Amino acid sequence: MESSKREPLLRELKDYLIHLKDLGYTEIPCEANLFANAQQSTGFQQSQPPLSTNEMAKSLTAVQKELGDCTRCKLSQTRKNIVFGSGNPNADLVFVGEGPGADEDEQGLPFVGRSGKKLTEIIEKGMGLNREKDTYICNIVKCRPPGNRDPEPEEIAACKPFLVQQLKAIKPKVIVALGKPASSTLLGRTVPIVKERGTWHEYEGIKLMLTFHPSYLIRFYTLENRKAVHDDMKKVLKELKR
Ligand code: SF4
Protein backbone atom coordinates (compact mmCIF):
# COMPACT_ATOMS: atom_id res chain seq x y z
CA MET A 1 0.00 0.00 0.00
CA GLU A 2 1.21 3.50 -0.82
CA SER A 3 2.48 5.40 2.20
CA SER A 4 0.08 8.33 1.45
CA LYS A 5 -2.83 5.92 1.92
CA ARG A 6 -1.26 4.01 4.80
CA GLU A 7 -0.60 7.00 7.06
CA PRO A 8 -4.21 8.19 7.49
CA LEU A 9 -5.25 4.57 8.11
CA LEU A 10 -2.56 4.14 10.77
CA ARG A 11 -3.61 7.43 12.40
CA GLU A 12 -7.23 6.25 12.46
CA LEU A 13 -6.16 2.91 13.95
CA LYS A 14 -4.08 4.68 16.62
CA ASP A 15 -7.06 6.92 17.58
CA TYR A 16 -9.31 3.85 17.74
CA LEU A 17 -6.87 2.02 20.04
CA ILE A 18 -6.57 5.07 22.32
CA HIS A 19 -10.35 5.27 22.41
CA LEU A 20 -10.55 1.59 23.47
CA LYS A 21 -7.91 2.19 26.15
CA ASP A 22 -9.97 5.11 27.48
CA LEU A 23 -12.94 2.78 27.72
CA GLY A 24 -10.89 0.42 29.84
CA TYR A 25 -10.10 -2.26 27.28
CA THR A 26 -6.80 -4.01 27.87
CA GLU A 27 -7.20 -6.32 24.86
CA ILE A 28 -8.36 -5.66 21.33
CA PRO A 29 -11.94 -6.83 20.85
CA CYS A 30 -12.54 -9.19 17.91
CA GLU A 31 -15.17 -7.02 16.27
CA ALA A 32 -13.39 -4.17 14.55
CA ASN A 33 -16.69 -2.29 14.15
CA LEU A 34 -17.54 -2.42 17.87
CA PHE A 35 -18.68 1.20 18.02
CA ALA A 36 -20.55 1.10 14.73
CA ASN A 37 -22.48 -1.86 16.13
CA ALA A 38 -23.18 -0.02 19.38
CA GLN A 39 -24.61 2.92 17.46
CA GLN A 40 -26.71 0.71 15.25
CA SER A 41 -28.12 -1.14 18.26
CA THR A 42 -29.42 2.14 19.70
CA GLY A 43 -30.71 3.35 16.35
CA PHE A 44 -28.94 6.65 16.99
CA GLN A 45 -26.55 8.07 14.45
CA GLN A 46 -24.49 11.04 15.55
CA SER A 47 -23.31 13.53 12.98
CA GLN A 48 -20.66 15.40 15.00
CA PRO A 49 -17.09 14.11 15.08
CA PRO A 50 -15.87 12.48 18.30
CA LEU A 51 -13.26 14.37 20.30
CA SER A 52 -9.87 12.70 20.44
CA THR A 53 -8.60 12.19 24.00
CA ASN A 54 -4.94 12.42 23.02
CA GLU A 55 -5.15 16.08 22.11
CA MET A 56 -3.10 18.70 23.95
CA ALA A 57 -4.71 20.45 26.90
CA LYS A 58 -7.11 23.23 25.92
CA SER A 59 -8.85 25.83 28.03
CA LEU A 60 -12.17 24.88 29.58
CA THR A 61 -13.82 27.49 27.36
CA ALA A 62 -12.33 25.86 24.27
CA VAL A 63 -13.53 22.41 25.43
CA GLN A 64 -17.03 23.78 26.02
CA LYS A 65 -16.99 25.46 22.60
CA GLU A 66 -15.99 22.19 20.98
CA LEU A 67 -18.78 20.38 22.83
CA GLY A 68 -21.19 22.94 21.36
CA ASP A 69 -24.81 21.91 21.01
CA CYS A 70 -23.68 18.31 21.23
CA THR A 71 -25.61 15.52 19.50
CA ARG A 72 -22.89 12.87 19.78
CA CYS A 73 -25.15 10.46 21.67
CA LYS A 74 -28.85 9.83 22.08
CA LEU A 75 -29.07 11.68 25.41
CA SER A 76 -29.16 14.84 23.29
CA GLN A 77 -32.67 13.88 22.16
CA THR A 78 -34.21 14.10 25.65
CA ARG A 79 -32.13 16.69 27.50
CA LYS A 80 -33.21 20.28 28.14
CA ASN A 81 -29.75 21.67 28.84
CA ILE A 82 -26.19 20.42 28.59
CA VAL A 83 -24.58 20.45 32.03
CA PHE A 84 -20.93 21.13 31.31
CA GLY A 85 -19.63 21.80 34.83
CA SER A 86 -19.18 24.65 37.27
CA GLY A 87 -16.70 26.06 39.74
CA ASN A 88 -13.15 27.35 39.63
CA PRO A 89 -11.35 26.44 36.37
CA ASN A 90 -8.07 26.46 38.34
CA ALA A 91 -9.30 24.44 41.31
CA ASP A 92 -7.02 22.00 43.10
CA LEU A 93 -9.98 19.74 43.71
CA VAL A 94 -12.44 18.33 41.14
CA PHE A 95 -15.51 16.25 41.95
CA VAL A 96 -16.74 13.97 39.18
CA GLY A 97 -20.29 12.64 39.38
CA GLU A 98 -22.36 10.40 37.16
CA GLY A 99 -24.78 12.59 35.22
CA PRO A 100 -27.29 15.40 35.57
CA GLY A 101 -30.66 14.82 37.22
CA ALA A 102 -33.93 16.70 36.66
CA ASP A 103 -32.93 19.89 38.51
CA GLU A 104 -29.55 20.00 36.80
CA ASP A 105 -31.19 19.44 33.41
CA GLU A 106 -33.55 22.38 34.09
CA GLN A 107 -30.80 24.75 35.22
CA GLY A 108 -27.84 23.58 33.13
CA LEU A 109 -25.72 23.36 36.28
CA PRO A 110 -24.27 20.32 38.06
CA PHE A 111 -25.32 19.16 41.52
CA VAL A 112 -28.06 21.71 42.24
CA GLY A 113 -30.78 19.29 43.42
CA ARG A 114 -30.96 17.23 46.60
CA SER A 115 -27.66 15.45 45.91
CA GLY A 116 -26.12 18.83 45.13
CA LYS A 117 -27.19 20.22 48.49
CA LYS A 118 -25.62 17.20 50.17
CA LEU A 119 -22.40 17.67 48.16
CA THR A 120 -22.29 21.37 49.08
CA GLU A 121 -22.76 20.39 52.73
CA ILE A 122 -19.87 17.90 52.47
CA ILE A 123 -17.62 20.53 50.83
CA GLU A 124 -18.55 23.53 52.96
CA LYS A 125 -19.52 22.15 56.38
CA GLY A 126 -17.51 18.94 56.30
CA MET A 127 -14.34 20.14 54.57
CA GLY A 128 -14.47 23.86 55.36
CA LEU A 129 -13.99 24.77 51.66
CA ASN A 130 -15.94 27.07 49.39
CA ARG A 131 -17.72 25.14 46.65
CA GLU A 132 -17.38 27.79 43.92
CA LYS A 133 -13.88 29.03 44.80
CA ASP A 134 -12.13 25.83 45.86
CA THR A 135 -13.64 23.17 43.62
CA TYR A 136 -14.79 22.35 40.12
CA ILE A 137 -17.71 19.93 39.67
CA CYS A 138 -18.70 17.97 36.58
CA ASN A 139 -20.09 14.62 35.46
CA ILE A 140 -19.09 11.74 33.20
CA VAL A 141 -22.06 12.50 30.90
CA LYS A 142 -23.21 16.05 30.32
CA CYS A 143 -26.85 15.29 29.50
CA ARG A 144 -29.51 13.78 31.74
CA PRO A 145 -30.22 10.07 31.21
CA PRO A 146 -34.03 9.78 31.03
CA GLY A 147 -35.62 8.77 34.35
CA ASN A 148 -32.20 9.11 35.99
CA ARG A 149 -31.15 5.70 34.69
CA ASP A 150 -27.43 4.87 34.60
CA PRO A 151 -25.64 6.22 31.52
CA GLU A 152 -25.07 3.49 28.91
CA PRO A 153 -21.57 2.49 27.79
CA GLU A 154 -21.88 4.14 24.36
CA GLU A 155 -23.12 7.37 26.00
CA ILE A 156 -20.15 7.35 28.37
CA ALA A 157 -17.83 6.59 25.44
CA ALA A 158 -19.21 9.53 23.46
CA CYS A 159 -18.97 11.98 26.36
CA LYS A 160 -15.82 10.85 28.16
CA PRO A 161 -13.39 12.66 25.84
CA PHE A 162 -14.87 15.95 27.07
CA LEU A 163 -14.34 14.94 30.70
CA VAL A 164 -10.76 13.96 29.83
CA GLN A 165 -10.21 17.40 28.27
CA GLN A 166 -11.83 19.17 31.23
CA LEU A 167 -9.46 17.42 33.63
CA LYS A 168 -6.49 18.22 31.37
CA ALA A 169 -7.52 21.88 31.33
CA ILE A 170 -8.01 22.18 35.11
CA LYS A 171 -5.02 20.04 36.15
CA PRO A 172 -6.27 19.57 39.73
CA LYS A 173 -4.15 18.08 42.51
CA VAL A 174 -6.95 15.73 43.54
CA ILE A 175 -10.00 14.25 41.80
CA VAL A 176 -12.83 12.75 43.83
CA ALA A 177 -14.96 10.24 41.94
CA LEU A 178 -18.49 10.18 43.34
CA GLY A 179 -19.93 6.67 43.15
CA LYS A 180 -19.40 3.60 41.04
CA PRO A 181 -20.02 4.90 37.47
CA ALA A 182 -17.61 7.85 37.90
CA SER A 183 -14.99 5.64 39.60
CA SER A 184 -15.30 2.93 36.94
CA THR A 185 -15.12 5.45 34.09
CA LEU A 186 -11.99 7.12 35.42
CA LEU A 187 -10.24 3.87 36.28
CA GLY A 188 -11.36 1.99 33.15
CA ARG A 189 -12.64 -1.03 35.05
CA THR A 190 -15.69 -1.99 37.09
CA VAL A 191 -15.11 -0.65 40.58
CA PRO A 192 -16.83 -2.29 43.58
CA ILE A 193 -17.37 1.04 45.31
CA VAL A 194 -18.38 -0.30 48.73
CA LYS A 195 -15.09 -2.20 48.85
CA GLU A 196 -12.84 0.41 47.26
CA ARG A 197 -14.15 3.73 48.59
CA GLY A 198 -11.62 5.53 50.71
CA THR A 199 -8.69 4.25 48.68
CA TRP A 200 -6.26 6.32 46.64
CA HIS A 201 -5.75 5.69 42.95
CA GLU A 202 -4.20 7.63 40.12
CA TYR A 203 -5.73 9.16 37.02
CA GLU A 204 -3.20 10.49 34.46
CA GLY A 205 -0.75 11.33 37.26
CA ILE A 206 -3.45 12.98 39.42
CA LYS A 207 -4.42 11.54 42.83
CA LEU A 208 -7.87 10.02 42.65
CA MET A 209 -10.06 9.30 45.70
CA LEU A 210 -13.15 7.12 45.40
CA THR A 211 -16.14 7.78 47.60
CA PHE A 212 -19.91 7.31 47.73
CA HIS A 213 -22.19 9.43 45.54
CA PRO A 214 -24.17 11.96 47.65
CA SER A 215 -27.44 10.37 46.42
CA TYR A 216 -26.29 7.04 47.90
CA LEU A 217 -25.58 8.80 51.16
CA ILE A 218 -29.08 10.34 51.15
CA ARG A 219 -30.65 6.94 50.44
CA PHE A 220 -28.57 5.08 53.02
CA TYR A 221 -28.09 7.78 55.63
CA THR A 222 -26.40 5.63 58.24
CA LEU A 223 -23.78 6.69 60.72
CA GLU A 224 -21.37 4.24 59.08
CA ASN A 225 -21.79 5.74 55.58
CA ARG A 226 -21.58 9.32 56.86
CA LYS A 227 -18.39 8.47 58.73
CA ALA A 228 -16.99 6.75 55.63
CA VAL A 229 -17.44 9.87 53.45
CA HIS A 230 -16.15 12.08 56.27
CA ASP A 231 -13.00 9.93 56.52
CA ASP A 232 -12.52 9.99 52.72
CA MET A 233 -12.73 13.79 52.65
CA LYS A 234 -10.28 14.04 55.56
CA LYS A 235 -7.77 12.11 53.43
CA VAL A 236 -8.41 14.52 50.54
CA LEU A 237 -7.84 17.57 52.76
CA LYS A 238 -4.60 16.05 54.05
CA GLU A 239 -3.42 15.49 50.46
CA LEU A 240 -4.33 19.10 49.62
CA LYS A 241 -2.54 20.25 52.80
CA ARG A 242 -5.70 22.10 53.94
S1 SF4 B 1 -24.14 13.15 26.95
FE1 SF4 B 1 -22.27 14.11 26.18
S2 SF4 B 1 -21.90 13.10 24.20
FE2 SF4 B 1 -24.04 12.73 24.74
S3 SF4 B 1 -25.15 14.40 23.75
FE3 SF4 B 1 -24.72 15.03 25.84
S4 SF4 B 1 -22.84 16.20 25.72
FE4 SF4 B 1 -23.01 15.02 23.82
Image: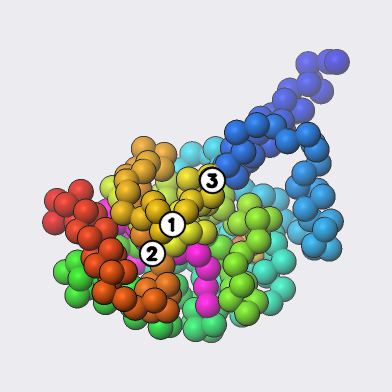
Q: Quick one: label 2, few (<14), some, or many (20+) residues within 10 Å?
A: many
Compare marks 3 and 2 and give the one earlier in the sequence: 3
**Quadrant location of residue 54?**
top right
Find residue 189 and name its label. 3
Q: How is the image coloured?
A: rainbow
Q: Is residue 19 visible?
A: yes
- Assess whether residue 88 is covered by the magenta stretch: yes
- Assess whether residue 151 is covered by the magenta stretch: no
Q: Is residue 138 visible?
A: no
* Quarter of the rendering occupied by the C terminus: bottom left
Write down the residue under mark 1.
193
Residue 38 placement, left or right of 130 = right
**Quadrant location of residue 217?**
bottom left
* Quarter of the rendering occupied by the N terminus: top right
Establish if 229 lies above or below 23.
below
In front of the other: label 1 or label 3? 1
Residue 178 placement, left or right of 132 = right
Is the residue indicated by label 2 positioned so its CB lies within 8 Å of ligand 1? no
Residue 209: give x, y in percent of width and height: 33, 52
Establish if 6 lies above or below 38.
above
Q: Amino acid at mark 1?
A: Ile
* x 61%, y 64%: residue: 151
Label pair 1/2, CB-CB below 8 angstroms? yes
Residue 13: give x, y in percent of width and height: 71, 30
Residue 215: give x, y in percent of width and height: 43, 75
